[in-house]
Image (spheres, rainbow, N blue to C red):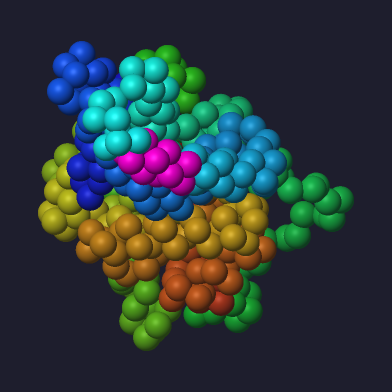
Amino acid sequence: MKVQLKPSTKHTFIVFLLWAFAPLAWFLMWRDKKYHTWFPKLLWINGIIFGVIFITQSVIAIPRLNAIYEALSIHIPSYVHPSAVGFVILFALAQIYAGHKLEQKVKVKKHFPNNYILPIVIIFAIDGILGFATGFLTTLTPARFLKPAYEKIYAPFVESTPTPTAQSSVIDISKYLQTPTTSPTPKPLSFTQMDEKYGPCVTLPTLVYHHVEDLSIAKKNNRLGLSVSPEAFTRHLAYLADNQYKTIEMKDLKAFFDNGTPIPAKSVLITFDDAYQDIYENAYPLLRAFGMKGTVFTPTGLIGNDGYLTWEQIAEMNDSGTMLFANHTWSHKSMFASNTEVTMEIETADRELRERNLGNPKIFAYPYGTVGKYSETELKKRDYTIAFTTQQGRVLCKKQALTLPRVRVQNESLESYGF
């Protein structure tokens, strides 16, 4: 299992790691009586350091714990974490007080009472365990714990995806996540009607992929519905090239919406959801070979976990000019979450992309393709003007710019999708 440390907090983790083994050092000090007079001072100094660092790290660790609990469907009452923090603070204060009192006692008696040794070693052990646990949650990327929830929600639907046709190439999972209605299916609008109602519009097929991997691996991991083989992906790119299609960039679509800059006929966008490792291994070399470009919608909290891209790989692909990396939330949480969670998911991913000079222009894709009530509002607040769903369609309109459709393709020829 791979452990991914944030570069800015590696030193913190090392401190907590050493702290967890500190009781052994103090036990060795106890073996040599000349060090016994140090114990009281170490006790109250350790209490101060522990209290300050624990409080600081708890501010970061508690929200991450909540995310893990929620992903694993574990209900923790709201009072538990504040109560635990309060208890630890009292423990640290008591430790400081006891250290001062014991130090005064040692000065008077000129020796350290042996009956205090075991309680102090136990206190140091508790400090070490709590410190190590908090440091672990603070410095490690906890999003790996969110992956089971993601697969539990998504995999059952994509696995039953019907064979794509020119009319239907994507399963709409929103009907599973929302209350079904009995309204009749509306008749699709023509391009002219859409242009009049939502325009300006452009016919711009936006292909969406997830995994590009050997299908034997996909079958083994129960994700055939999410996977396109490298051979099929090669055929897709070759078909586009042979038929004079050109991959444009997201900035070109933004220029069309913002300024009316024309988009050439036979243009196409290529997108990848979720930033899986095989994008770097299989899709990226093929795109470069064909001189084509793509966009990877990136859940930043999952980066560096098993099966996902690393930031180093992302930097390489971005620097090559082949890939744009765009916002796909922090932990791939559904946008049907609470307003606070939606804000955190979008804001955190936005910040982490900006810190690495990524995510420009600001483009978003909704996890699971579903648009929550508050998500559009939050995107507008943060100057996102383009966002994609997984709704089927190839006509992109300015007045629908935050709910744009895409074409989800699998292993069939692009001709079966109407190309």
Residue drawn at the location 49% of the way across and 55% of the way down: 345
User: Which residue is at the front of the view, 146 or 400?
Assistant: 146
Residue drawn at the location 35% of the way across and 62% of the way down: 351
Q: Is residue 241 left or right of residue 115?
A: left
Q: Is residue 55 above or below residue 41?
A: below
95 falls in the magenta region: yes
Q: Is residue 91 left or right of residue 183?
A: left
Look at the image and tell me whether residue 65 can be seen: yes
Residue drawn at the location 66% of the way across and 38% of the way down: 76
In the rendered image, the quadrant that contains the N terminus is top left
**Residue 279 x %, y %:** 28, 38
Look at the image and give the residue range highlighted in magenta: 93-104
User: Which residue is at the front of the view, 136 or 410?
Assistant: 136
**Residue 101 x %, y %:** 39, 41
Query: What residue occupies the far right of the structure in this picture?
Result: 182
What type of secondary structure mainly makes up the magenta span?
Answer: helix
> Image quarter for residue 61?
top left
